[in-house]
Structure formats: C-alpha cells, structure tokens
Image: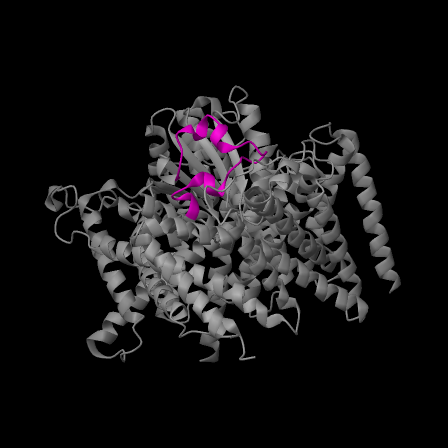
C-alpha cells in the first residue's frame, strides 16, 4: 500500500513537471500559486507515503562524532542551544542526537543558551529526550541546565574566564558552586568539548571567536543549513566538525544508531525528513532547468 | 465587513471547535490535561494554516497571526531577560532582602568603598538602562546616547581583538597549505589518480584553496582598477565566489525546505494524526 | 556634553576591553564592564517592548489603518508578559525556571510562538521554489557556474547523487556527485568563504577602531 502511494505521488509530481515543461516551452505564463502547490505536493507526498534512504556520514560529520566517541568517560561537555523556532525543524534533531550521544558515553553535560528562545527548546529536549531515555541520570550530577543570559558575546566574554560569575545558579535557582558538576569547572577552559547548536547571531561563530580560540577549547557545531557553508573556513583547526542542516542531522543519527544500537529504535526525525527533502530538491532542480530551457527558447525565437 | 468575511470567520471558529473536541477525545493527559493538550495542538495547527494562507493572498487571518507573533515574541524575550539577568545576576549582587524573596543566593561583595559594599557599582548599568529607555521620549532622548556609547564601545572593544585573531590571523595562517607534497607525506606519485581521498585530490584542494583565497581577496580590492594581470586574477576570484554562492544557494534551498517539511509533518502528524510525528 | 561624554565612554570602554586581552589584571575589570553590558541588554528588551506598546497604543488611539490588529498584538503581549512575570501556573516555586513544563508560559510558547515562528520562515520554501522557476537564469558564464555548483550540491546532498554516479570507478571517485559536493564545500567554497571572512574581518577591525577613536559617530544621531 505504501509503495503504491509512493508510486502514485511520483507519477503526480513528474506528470505535473512534464505539464509545466510543456507549458513553459510554449511560452505560456504559469501562475506562481501553481508553483506553490507543486512544492507542497512534493513535500507532503513523501510525508504521507514515507520514502527512506540510507545515510552515510561525510567527513565533517564523522570527525565530530569520532571526537565525542573518543573522549574519556566523565569528560565535561558544554552544549549551547542557540536557536529559535524558525530553525527548530533542522536543528532540534541534531541537538537531541548530540545530547543523547554525550550522555550515553557517560560525559557530564552542561546545557546553556545564548538565545532566550533556546531555553524553552532546551526544556523540551530535557523533558522529551533526556529524562525519559536516561532516567538513571541525576540533574546536578550527570547533567545540568543553566539556562539563558542576556548579552550575546558579553556572556561568552565572561564565561571564558569565570563561568559562575555569569551563571551563579542553574535554571531552578540552585547555586552552581554547590553542585557536583561545577566542583571542577571554573571557566570554559575546563570543558573538554563545547557543542554550539544554532545558526544565527550569537551562535557558532561567536563561540569560536570568543571561547574556542582564546581558551583553546575544541568546538563542534550543529547549524542550520543556511549558515553551514560559512563555517567551513574554521574547519578543521578551529572547529572539529560541522553538522549542516537536516542532512547533517540524518548522518549523525545514522552514525549514532550504528555505534549505539539502543538508539536504533528511537525516532530519527532527521532521517525521516530526508525523503521529502530529496524529492523537493528534485523538483527545485527541475524548476531551474525548465525555466532556463524556456528562456533559451524565447531568446532563440527573438533572434 | 463583507458577508463573506463573516462566513469565513464563522467557518474558522466552527472548525477550530470541532478540531479541539476531536483531539480532546483522542489525546491523553501529558504535561497538561488532554483538553489543554488538544487546545495547544489545534491552536498551533490553525496558526500554521493562517500563516500559510498568505500564499494565496494577504488576508485578515494572516494579519491576525502576524500581529499575534509580534506581541508574544516581544513579551517572551522581556520575561526571559527579566528572570535570567535582572533576577539572576543583578538582584543577587545588590539587594540581599530581594535575593531572599526571589530565592536567589546573595552574592556579597568582597570589597567596599568607604563602608559601602562594592557591588553598589551594579546600580550603574541600571541607571544607564533607564537612560536607554529615555529614547522613547522626544525631549530627553539625547540621554540615551550614553548607554548607546557604552554598548557600542563594548561591542567594538570585544570584536576588535577576536575578529583580528580568529577571522584574520587564523584564516590567513590556515591558507598557508602545502602546495608541493601532502601533509601526511604520502607521495603524490604513489597513486596518481583522482580518488576522492587520495593525495592528488588533497594537493589539488590545497591549490584551489590557496589560489581561491588569494584571487577572492584581489577581487575585493577596489582601490585599484581591475585591468591586466590584476583583472585576470580578479576574474578567477569571481569564479571562485560564484561557486561559493552556488554552494550557499544549495544549502539555503535545503534549509528552507526543511522548515516546510517540519511544519507539514506537524500538521499531518500531531494535528491530523495520519503520520508519525 | 551631548557628544563629548558619549565619545569618551566609547573610547574608554573600547580601549579597556582591548587592553584586558593583553594585561590579565585588567581582565577582571573587563568582565565587570561586560556584566554591565549584559544587564543593560535587558533594558534594550524593555525598550523594544515599550516601543511596541507606544506604536500600537498610538495606532489604536488615532484609529490608523489596520488598528483592530493592534488589539491582537497588545493582547498577546499582555497575556505572555503576565504569564512570564507572574509565573502563572508554574509547578515550581518562585526560583523555578519561568518556562518550566506545565506553566502557562511554556504552554503559550509551544502553542503559539513555535508554530508562528516556524511557519513564517517555512514560507520561504515556496518563494525559493517560485524564484527557481522564474528568476534563476544562466544568463552568463558566472551565473552558469553558480547554477552548476548549486546543482551539484543539491544532488550531492541527496541519495540520488550516488544512484546517478555510483558507477564511476574508484580511481576517479572525485567525480561521484556526493564526493564532488563534499570537495566543493571543502575547497572552492572554503576558499570563497575565507576570502569573504577575511574581508569582513578587516572591515570589523577598522570599524571598531573608527568607533573607539570617535571617527565614526553615526550611532550618536544628529547633533542636538
């Protein structure tokens, strides 16, 4: 039944593209709302009739995975949720996957945010991923959430040398210097790895500029696809790995499930989104080709 | 208002109520009771559809959703800023009694000025902040220049060294890559092929990076006319930049599509319940 | 005074934060001023909220076009503010996080802010598709190069890239589309982004100097 649905949706989409091609080469205008319907169908059909693909991690993703995998147990990792609901569909899957990986490896994780909206999205990760999947872990001993502080780079400028000065308590008012985790942490330099998940400003770039380079702490980044190309100049000397967009999330989820079979059964939203993503890419490329063919035909007719 | 407008609004209200009732019957209690969970899902779905209605044309439902977003966003950031920074950082440093009231650990100052606790200096940013609010006044708006100057000075001072170190020196040093031989000393001639992970491609990459960065920077140098060898180098820079923008475009398309996939998954999954969400 | 004191403040703070990097004892002072900056940032949010109130109350009062929507904005603002400031229905005590699961604040965030924010940006997918059909034209060599690179990336980031080009032997595996996409990101894209980054970096450095030294004064507004 599912395969039938996939076939029918592919027929509808490619049939529609053929109609669009015919109309375009005839020089007839196509209303933009028709284009909108096309892209909606191209995305909705593989959601209704799932198409799944296998993913293999590219080197920039694998290097981040290997870094977390190679850290000794009880390493200190800081994960910063620096995004808003607009980036959530891309970035939340990688934030969840990175959190799972770090906690599964027995690392001590400190969660924080440079965006106010990140705090509520971090709470969602804690409630829907961390607490249900790691019920044996103790807040304050194995992980802790210190929440958000206003100030963008100003926050980073303080925590690079004195973490508790900026975050005196955790998100629920418990003094950090009374927690087990912060007995050994005075500043960002005491972390073994910092993972910046986000994509806007402040975000991964500010983490590299204000913390990674000054304190010489390895930084890994998980970013929205729009921002990913801009971080490649930092790789690999200033950034250990880059998860770019939903593809990066899908690759990481695949690697995580392969290395830690307990995560094979958990929901992999990144991987699930690759089906609609692939079909939508095909449609966009077809639009570009059809549009250019129509342009060349019109140009030749004019000549 | 036109009769059709009333009909549309009436239809939306009826559909909302039906959806809420239906979802209440299928959802279980979670963090909130099933009635409120159903309201949350229904409201989220209707707001999503209200924004999507803009694709047809601008309409009152879209305007409603847009204005609502502006209002709640502003209030959200204010609340987070208040609790995280005013209650979390300012009050514990200045007012012991208020700290106790908010159940925040009081942070006494380790030094004092003529018997006054040193933390009194944290009144300064509050005063500057109040001066910033003077921007709303036409008569006293000039007072906001002082805190603005503070913000500008802080940003400029912080950025000066960091950008110099990470975005200039580090980037220039990273561009000095081996152009003869490869970093791991594997001979290029050991396997002269275009295997993606082979030494020839690694060397080729180094040349592309070196020439690409150099020619890109030459393109951005507008103080000299782009003629002769300078112009040819600049042309190479343009080609490199075009590939860069093409890559950015590809990633941008991917990013935007992902957001759409996320919303449609929500509508089909969480709201209509016909797919896994 | 209206110009001189702000210029002096900018100079003093800017120079201090630069010196703090090189002379550690000044680092403590630099951190203190950065903490001041963080507390002042809160007032910037209050300023934004205050401005919002002023604009929409003014719209309501003067019955400007679309004034009924200002009621929506102000209602949403008021409800979210009350939910946050008074921690309505928060299961914890006054020290608990404002967005604790179960609170009205958390509810409104997930019921309204998340769908509105996500959907606003997801509209761009439709406009990208429309632009792909109507506007992305290979009119010259440079545009063609851009489109070819975009194509390779779009194909390479999907499994179809491997399906189409998986037959290419290992000796020339660079030309397998996924490998080509990875190479484009790691080489020409890196080079172009680095050139842009160095250019922007130089611009930020020079602008920071201009601001600190008082050469650039546009942030002070008109001479009143």
Which residues, given as a range, are shown in magenta? A158-187
| Residue B155 x, y percent position in the rendering | 44, 60
Nearer to me, C51 or B88: B88
Which quarter of the rendered picture does the N terminus of chain A lie within?
top right
| Residue C88 x, y percent position in the rendering | 73, 39
Which quarter of the rendered picture does the C terminus of chain A lie within?
bottom left
Q: Is residue B200 left or right of residue A261?
A: left
| Residue A302 x, y percent position in the rendering | 48, 79
Q: Quadrant of residue C105?
A: top right
Residue placed at 38% from the left, 65% from the top? C208
Residue placed at 59% from the left, 63% from the top? B132
Nearer to me, A218 or B143: B143
Q: Main secondary structure of the magenta part?
A: loop
Residue C147 visible in rendering:
no
Q: Quadrant of residue C178?
A: top left
Magenta stretch contains residue A174: yes
Q: Is residue A287 left or right of residue C109?
A: left
- Examine the rendered structure and indicate whether residue A74 appears above or below residue B64: above
Magenta stretch contains residue A206: no
Q: Name the residue at the right extreme.
A: B3
């Amino acid at each position: 039944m599912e395969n039938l649905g996939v076939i029918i949706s592919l027929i509808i989409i490619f049939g529609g593209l053929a109609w669009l091609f015919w109309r375009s080469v005839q020089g007839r205008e196509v209303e933009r709302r028709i284009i909108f319907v096309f892209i909606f169908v191209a995305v909705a059909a593989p959601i209704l009739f799932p198409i799944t693909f296998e993913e293999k991690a590219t080197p920039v993703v694998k290097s981040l995975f290997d870094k977390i995998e190679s850290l000794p147990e009880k390493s200190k990792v800081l994960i910063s949720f620096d995004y808003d609901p607009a980036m959530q569909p891309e970035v939340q899957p990688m934030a969840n996957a990175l959190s799972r990986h770090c906690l599964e490896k027995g690392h001590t994780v400190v969660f924080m945010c440079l965006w106010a909206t990140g705090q509520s999205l971090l709470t969602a990760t804690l409630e829907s991923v961390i607490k249900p999947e790691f019920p044996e872990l103790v807040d304050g001993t194995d992980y802790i959430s210190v929440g958000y502080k206003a100030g963008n780079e100003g926050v980073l400028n303080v925590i690079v040398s004195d973490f508790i000065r900026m975050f005196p308590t955790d998100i629920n008012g418990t003094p950090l210097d009374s927690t087990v985790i912060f007995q050994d942490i005075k500043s960002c330099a005491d972390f073994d790895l910092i993972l910046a998940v986000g994509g806007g400003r402040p975000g991964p770039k500010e983490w590299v500029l204000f913390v990674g380079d000054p304190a010489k702490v390895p930084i890994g980044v998980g970013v929205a696809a729009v921002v990913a190309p801009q971080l490649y100049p930092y790789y690999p000397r200033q950034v250990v790995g880059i998860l770019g967009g939903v593809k990066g999330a899908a690759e990481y989820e695949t690697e995580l499930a392969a290395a830690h079979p307990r995560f094979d059964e958990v929901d992999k939203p990144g991987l699930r989104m690759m089906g609609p993503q692939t079909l939508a890419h095909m449609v966009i490329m077809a639009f570009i080709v059809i549009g250019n063919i129509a342009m060349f035909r019109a140009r030749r007719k004019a000549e | 208002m036109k009769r059709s407008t009333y009909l549309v609004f009436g239809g939306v209200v009826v559909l909302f109520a039906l959806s809420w009732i239906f979802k209440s019957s299928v959802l279980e209690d979670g963090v909130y009771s099933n009635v409120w969970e159903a309201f949350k899902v229904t409201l989220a779905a209707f707001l999503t559809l209200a924004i999507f209605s803009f694709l047809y044309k601008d309409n009152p439902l879209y305007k409603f959703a847009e204005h609502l977003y502006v209002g709640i966003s502003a209030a959200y950031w204010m609340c987070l800023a208040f609790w995280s920074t005013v209650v979390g950082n300012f009050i514990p440093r200045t007012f012991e009694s208020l700290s106790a009231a908010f159940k925040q650990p009081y942070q006494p100052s380790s030094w004092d000025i003529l018997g006054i606790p040193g933390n009194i200096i944290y009144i300064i940013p509050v005063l500057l902040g109040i001066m910033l609010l003077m921007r709303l006044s036409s008569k006293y708006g000039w007072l906001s220049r002082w805190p603005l100057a503070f913000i500008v000075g802080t940003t400029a001072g912080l950025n000066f060294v960091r950008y110099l170190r990470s975005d200039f020196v580090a980037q220039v040093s990273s561009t000095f890559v081996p152009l003869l031989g490869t970093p791991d000393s594997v001979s290029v001639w050991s396997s002269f092929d275009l295997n993606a992970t082979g030494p020839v491609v690694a060397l080729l990459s180094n040349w592309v990076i070196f020439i690409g960065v150099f020619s890109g920077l030459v393109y951005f140098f507008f103080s000299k006319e782009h003629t002769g060898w300078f112009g040819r180098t600049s042309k190479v820079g343009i080609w490199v930049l075009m590939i860069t923008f093409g890559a950015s475009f590809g990633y941008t398309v991917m990013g935007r599509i992902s957001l759409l996939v996320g919303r449609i998954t929500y509508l089909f999954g969480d709201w209509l319940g016909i797919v896994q969400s | 005074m209206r110009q001189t004191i702000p210029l002096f403040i900018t100079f003093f703070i800017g120079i201090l934060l630069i010196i703090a990097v090189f002379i550690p004892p000044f680092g403590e002072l630099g951190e203190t001023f950065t903490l001041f900056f963080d507390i002042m940032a809160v007032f910037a949010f209050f300023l934004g909220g205050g401005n919002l109130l002023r604009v929409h109350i003014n719209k309501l009062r003067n019955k400007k076009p679309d004034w009924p929507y200002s009621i929506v904005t102000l209602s949403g603002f008021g409800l979210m503010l009350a939910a946050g400031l008074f921690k309505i229905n928060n299961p914890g005590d006054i020290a608990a996080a404002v967005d604790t699961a179960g609170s009205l604040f958390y509810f409104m965030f997930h019921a309204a802010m998340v769908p509105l924010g996500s959907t606003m940006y997801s509209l761009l997918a439709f406009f990208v598709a429309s632009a792909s059909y109507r506007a992305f034209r290979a009119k010259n060599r440079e545009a063609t190069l851009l489109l070819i690179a975009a194509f390779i990336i779009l194909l390479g980031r999907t499994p179809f890239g491997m399906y189409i080009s998986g037959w290419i032997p290992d000796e020339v595996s660079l030309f397998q589309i996924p490998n080509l996409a990875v190479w484009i990101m790691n080489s020409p894209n890196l080079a172009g982004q680095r050139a842009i980054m160095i250019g922007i970096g130089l611009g930020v450095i020079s602008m920071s100097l201009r601001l600190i030294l008082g050469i650039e004064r546009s942030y002070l507004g008109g001479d009143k």
